[in-house]
């Protein structure tokens, strides 16, 4: 009996030509037309204005938290069911994750549980949402769309908006999914995507951030290339994280998800974890 794979790559036939062009032209690092084209296509596909490619989804989460100013003095809300990278990225900032329950119908963060928790446990101080028991700011909320299933976004966004909590939308598993006709990844202040080998869209590895915020996109583009100043200056202008992907990763391959899932196993029991801090 033939076995059906949970996921396997589908090659369009032009991959060798793209890789050869990268080698022939010398564009094998973090620049070149393939990376830029990929970023543009991602923005178009997610209905956002800007796409910034990075080395993996963990780096994208890390940068999203950094760009929004999350520090070691803060706390970040995450669903209790998620891949470890979501929480690792919070740990990279020295911040504390706050785990809230998920819904049975979506496997994502429960907006009702979120609203109830925030109403009961937090208060506004100086324009920031602060957890009363710890005195720490809740600096972000990171809902994750599990296995491509959209979180109930409108009530979640409303609960965060009225308390000035920025939303980082973890759409690592959800490119191609939408909610009320709008692509996932486009609802938060910034969206995070992954192109690991088991995702719906893969470059073998890689990740990206998408946003409508020009200022965030400009800073992210600068940070991912070590904040280098314009030529001919060799200087960097700020703290930065060299997180750009190689150019040969800019030609994505689609994957077949034979069960409708984008992961090869339970979210917290992956056989191999690659978490690269840029």
Image (tube, rainbow, N blue to C red):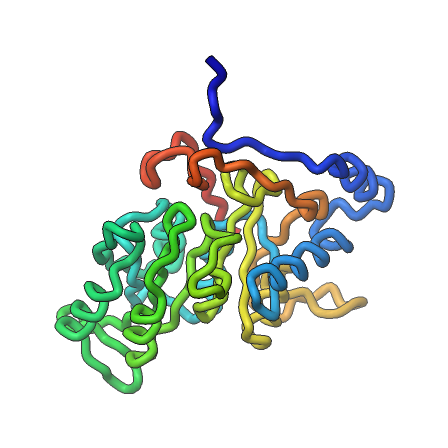
Pick the front one: 181 or 95: 181
Pick the front one: 277 or 41: 41
What residue lies at 45% left-to-right and 41% top-to-bottom?
Answer: 262
- Left or right: 159 in relation to 142: left
Give percent across and percent down for residue 164.
33, 79
Outermost residue toward the top? 1
What residue lies at 21% left-to-right and 55% top-to-bottom?
Answer: 101
Give percent across and percent down for residue 135.
19, 73
Q: Is residue 84 above or below residue 166?
A: above
Pick the front one: 158 or 82: 158
Q: Is residue 143 above or below residue 249?
A: below
Outermost residue toward the right? 24
What residue lies at 61% left-to-right and 56% top-to-bottom?
Answer: 53
What residue lies at 70% left-to-right and 37% top-to-bottom?
Answer: 12
Give percent across and percent down for residue 227.
63, 65
Give percent across and percent down for residue 54.
58, 53
- Left or right: 38 in relation to 74: right
Outermost residue toward the bottom? 126
For the image shown, how many numbered marks are present on the structure? 0
């Amino acid at each position: 009996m033939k076995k059906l794979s949970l996921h396997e790559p589908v090659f369009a036939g032009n991959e060798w030509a793209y890789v050869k062009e990268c080698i022939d032209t010398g564009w094998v690092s973090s620049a070149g037309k393939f990376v830029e084209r990929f970023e543009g296509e991602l923005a178009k596909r997610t209905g956002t204005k800007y796409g910034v490619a990075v080395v993996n989804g963990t780096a994208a989460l890390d940068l999203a938290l950094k760009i929004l100013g999350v520090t070691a003095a803060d706390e970040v809300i995450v669903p209790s069911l998620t891949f470890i990278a979501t929480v690792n990225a919070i740990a990279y900032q020295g911040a504390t994750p706050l785990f809230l329950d998920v819904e049975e119908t979506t496997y994502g963060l429960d907006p009702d549980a979120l609203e109830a928790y925030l109403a009961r446990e937090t208060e506004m101080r100086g324009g920031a949402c602060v957890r009363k028991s710890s005195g720490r700011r809740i600096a972000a909320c990171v809902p994750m769309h599990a296995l491509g299933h959209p979180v109930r976004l409108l009530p979640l966004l409303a609960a965060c908006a009225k308390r000035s909590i920025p939303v980082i939308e973890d759409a690592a598993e959800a490119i191609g999914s939408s909610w009320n006709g709008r692509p996932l990844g486009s609802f938060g202040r910034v969206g995070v995507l992954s192109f690991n080998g088991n995702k719906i869209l893969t470059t073998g590895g890689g990740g990206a951030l998408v946003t409508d915020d020009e200022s965030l996109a400009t800073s992210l583009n600068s940070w991912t290339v070590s904040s280098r100043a314009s030529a001919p200056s060799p200087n960097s202008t700020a703290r930065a994280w060299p997180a750009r992907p190689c150019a040969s990763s800019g030609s994505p391959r689609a994957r077949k998800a034979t069960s409708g899932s984008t992961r090869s196993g339970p979210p917290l029991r992956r056989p191999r974890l690659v978490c690269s801090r840029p």
